[in-house]
Amino acid sequence: MSDLLGIAILILFGALFAMSEISIAAARKIKLRVMADEGNEKAKAVVRLQEQPGNFFAMIQIALNAIAILGGIIGEQTLTPYTAKLVALVYTGALAEQISFVLSFLAITSLFILFADLLPKRIAMIMPEAVAVKIVGLMNTITYALKPFVMLFNSITNLILRIFKVPTVREDVVTTEDIVAMMDAGAEHGSLQQQEYHLLGNVFELEGRTLPTAMTTRDSIVYFDINDDSETISAKILEHPHNNFLVCDGHLERVIGSVESKQILRQLLKGESAHLKDSMIQTELFYLPETLTLSEALNEFKTALQPFAIVVNEYGMVVGLVTLKDLMSSFMGNLVTMHGEEQIVERDANSWLVDGVTPIVDLMKLLEIDIFPNANQYETLAGFLIYTLKRLPKRTDYVILDGYKFEAIDVDGFKVEQLLVTRLTEPTVIHTGDTN
């Protein structure tokens, strides 16, 4: 009876060490660090163990091999008399002893495989962090108790690894791809809502998108001329109710400053005519180069504390205007109407009317196109059409890419105002067409 108890104790310890090995290896460092930040000291101990796992795994292998050897010896001696009695019931020939030995071997092996290996490892894989924090204290104590053996085997292992130029310490570097993979898994499982999934995805794109994808372009900027009369100023505010307006001397290359629309409205409410006084004009303006990413622009806004910035190119020419709201909309807004309802309008299930200034990244999301060719050469859909055609497009010129037709339907001078994007019934490689 005591031998059977001994087998049960060996199986129990085997299960404990097997669970420890898998849980420590499988525990996610990100989750452990969250637990550690919340004050869980055992989670901190698990992180330290993962960073220096050599001694722990040496102890585990010593313990598991010792248990396996003892289990084989004790198990065979303990179970053979029982199996011999069972065999004697049906067979009493010369091979009875060998048959009983094989049966006892299979029985003890099956018990250890099932209860000391498979079941505990499955449990540890299902909830690695929970198991790891529960057993880490005990494992550290056993490692310390077996320190001479652990240091011997661990030193030999490290020497072999160095000979073959294999790192002796695991480096855990969480990349953007790792986080995106976790987001994909969360969205697929349902623990991450679709809106949250898209929001986080947009945040990661801030480093890959530049200011032209979020700014108001030069030709859409509404500004006051210093010589505008009251009627002109009132009409501009009425038609374009912005909070701030640039004040220029004739054109955008001669920017004087900016004025808040509420100051003009205050004049009108007092019964005065709308006019631009020097005291109303804010001459300190905030400029940003067009090459900045959205992430860099957000950081600049944090330090500048300005409501908007004038975007300039390398020649000092004003190319656009961007507000903090524009930058926030780049990852907070709806995917289809990120920069306003008019940018992408769905006509039916297979076609969309799209503004030429729509950023390519927005089309990639909407149409689920993995990549646009040479995307670093342009920012907008109009830019893609111009780059692909190698000339300024005319009306009805088109490009076919990845099963979609991008056709210019509204061209005003040099500017592609609007395109019709159509999903084709058959997948098609890139192809161009024009009216010539």
Image: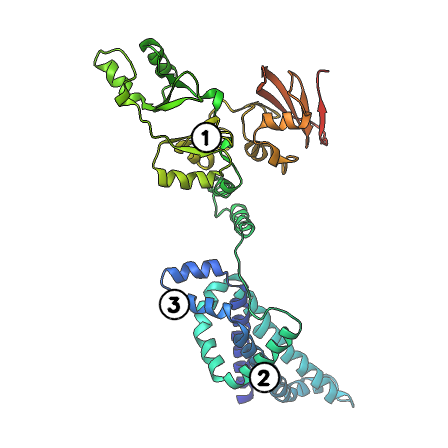
In the rendered image, residue 160, in percent from the top left (x then y), is placed at 64, 76
Q: Which mark is residue 41?
A: 3
| Quadrant of the rendering where the N terminus is positioned | bottom right
The CA span between labels 2 and 3 is: 31 Å
Q: Of the residues shown, which amino acid type is indicated by label 3?
A: Glu
Dot 1: element:
strand
Q: Which mark is residue 95?
A: none
Q: Which mark is residue 66?
A: 2
Q: Of the residues shown, which amino acid type is indicated by label 2?
A: Ala
In-image side of 10 versus 106 (left or right)? left
Instruction: Say which label, 1 or 3, has the lower sequence index.
Output: 3
Q: Are marks 1 and 3 in contact (CB under 8 Å)?
A: no
Q: Which mark is residue 311?
A: 1
Query: Is 190 placed above or below 294 here?
Result: below
| Quadrant of the rendering where the C terminus is positioned | top right
Instruction: Say which label, 2 or 3, has the lower sequence index.
Output: 3
Query: Is 233 placed above or below 169 here?
Result: above
Instruction: Say which label, 2 or 1, has the lower sequence index.
Output: 2
- Answer whether residue 389 is visible to the viewer in this image: yes
Residue sitting at x 47%, y 81% = 144
In the foreground, 396 or 248? 248
In the rendered image, residue 163, in percent from the top left (x then y), is placed at 66, 75
Query: Of tags 1 and 3, which is closer to the observer?
Result: 1
The CA span between labels 1 and 3 is: 50 Å
The CA span between labels 2 and 1 is: 71 Å
Q: Determine the residue located farthest toward the right in the rendered image.
A: 94
Query: Of tags 2 and 1, which is closer to the observer?
Result: 1
In the foreground, 289 or 244? 289
